[in-house]
Amino acid sequence: MSKVRVHISTSLDGYVAGPNQSMEEPLGEGGERLHDWLVALKAWREQAGMEGGEENSSGPVVRETHANVGAEIMGRGKFGPPSRGAWGDDPWRGWWGEDPPFHKPVFVLTHHEREPLTLTDTTFTFVTDGIEAALAQAREAAGDKDVFIGGGADVINQYLAAGLVDELELHVVPILLGGGARLFEGVGPDLKLKELRALEAPGVAHLKYRVAK
Amino acid sequence: MSKVRVHISTSLDGYVAGPNQSMEEPLGEGGERLHDWLVALKAWREQAGMEGGEENSSGPVVRETHANVGAEIMGRGKFGPPSRGAWGDDPWRGWWGEDPPFHKPVFVLTHHEREPLTLTDTTFTFVTDGIEAALAQAREAAGDKDVFIGGGADVINQYLAAGLVDELELHVVPILLGGGARLFEGVGPDLKLKELRALEAPGVAHLKYRVAK
């Protein structure tokens, strides 16, 4: 059966975004540094349709995270805009321009109904009836491929707490953010994990876990 | 010059002790599980004067943490008892019986004055004038060896925030504690780290950092 997978960059103090997320700083103060290790990579640049970039021990990890994913679920916080609330007459179309880098069905958890939005080969479907409904739709869309929970922290924490995640990989970046969106908040000791892998790479450590059922 | 070193076992959600620390559960609810990976090791048992135990990739890490340490600093929370407060007429002598496993000078940060306590080859000196004074005494006692900051979280966080730590190693255990004593609380983005090593081992991942000055 297809898996539900999470992978996300986190600061050493456990934040996946810094404080005060805004239009200017979608990942909060200092949060962009969470992706310094990633955007330098050839493996990331080729996925984004760009040339060049470094090859290092993070390359295979990043390619693995992209492989076999059939659908993504994200929260309203990741889709944006930071002001949230009702969509309005000229609704926000995401952070990613007219050719978003997903190339697969994306399900956006929101409290505000909206018709699907298709931009090139990415269709954003807005789901208002909760995380289990979104997962059922994403599984259907993914077929025998996996479903990726793309964040932010709040959505990941909800799926973890509900026991709906199969694999979790943290890209641990050697910075402290001191505040912001914290992974594992409200999850607690009922979540049982098995360590699958710990891997050193330039500017990041990759820690991968399977969730015990 | 000798270094100031921290190494500590932490849950994946960033706690070095669980909630509700007590006489029965000195590391709080679920906190003993932070040391499951450690107490099984030959490297730990030989340090504690016991025979047997496993050899695995954690062994060299544990031996390295014990090597070249000339003095330890700990908080009143680690020394105990959990009730804290004044020492009283029959003062607490630590958790470790009449032959504590330190075998070196230990400096205990406390708000309550007390004469030094010697148990076999470990002398506990009680320091009431703050972290810098304790570090000066510990450096003096350690000579050209290193000073180890032994915890708990509160003491480690104070030394990190003050920029007084040179090396930090986290033994990341694949459990969630959901609450308790949190590492890095109040430290924040001014602390600059460089990743030295990430190492996979059974039931734990070892992440080692140098603090940039």
Image (spheres, coloured by chain):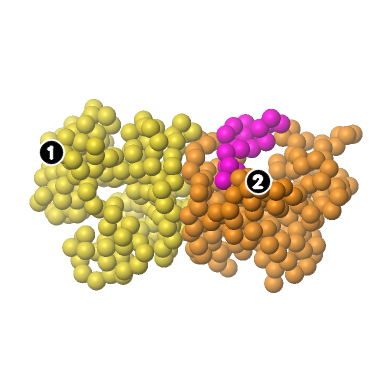
Chain colours: A orange, B yellow
Which residue was labeled with disc 2? A152
Residue A27 percent location from the top left of the image: 64, 37
Dot 1 falls on a residue whose secondary structure is loop
Q: Is residue A138 visible to us here?
A: yes
Q: In the visual, does B61 lie left or right of B89?
A: right
Residue A85 percent location from the top left of the image: 78, 36
- Residue type indicated by callout 2: Gly
Question: Which chain does the numbered disc 1 sit on?
Answer: B
Dot 2 falls on a residue whose secondary structure is loop
Residue A102 percent location from the top left of the image: 76, 52
Q: In the visual, does B90 lie left or right of B38?
A: left
Looking at the rendered image, the quarter that the N terminus of chain A falls into is bottom right
Name the residue located 38 percent from the left edge and 42 percent from the top edge.
B210
The magenta stretch spans residue A26: yes
Q: Nearest the camera: A148 or A129? A: A148
Residue B77 percent location from the top left of the image: 30, 42
The magenta stretch spans residue B67: no
Q: Is residue A175 above or below residue A6?
A: above
Q: In the visual, does B170 lie left or right of A177?
A: left
Which residue was labeled with disc 1? B116
Outermost top residue: B129
Question: Which chain does the numbered disc 2 sit on?
Answer: A
- What residue range appears in magenta? A18-37
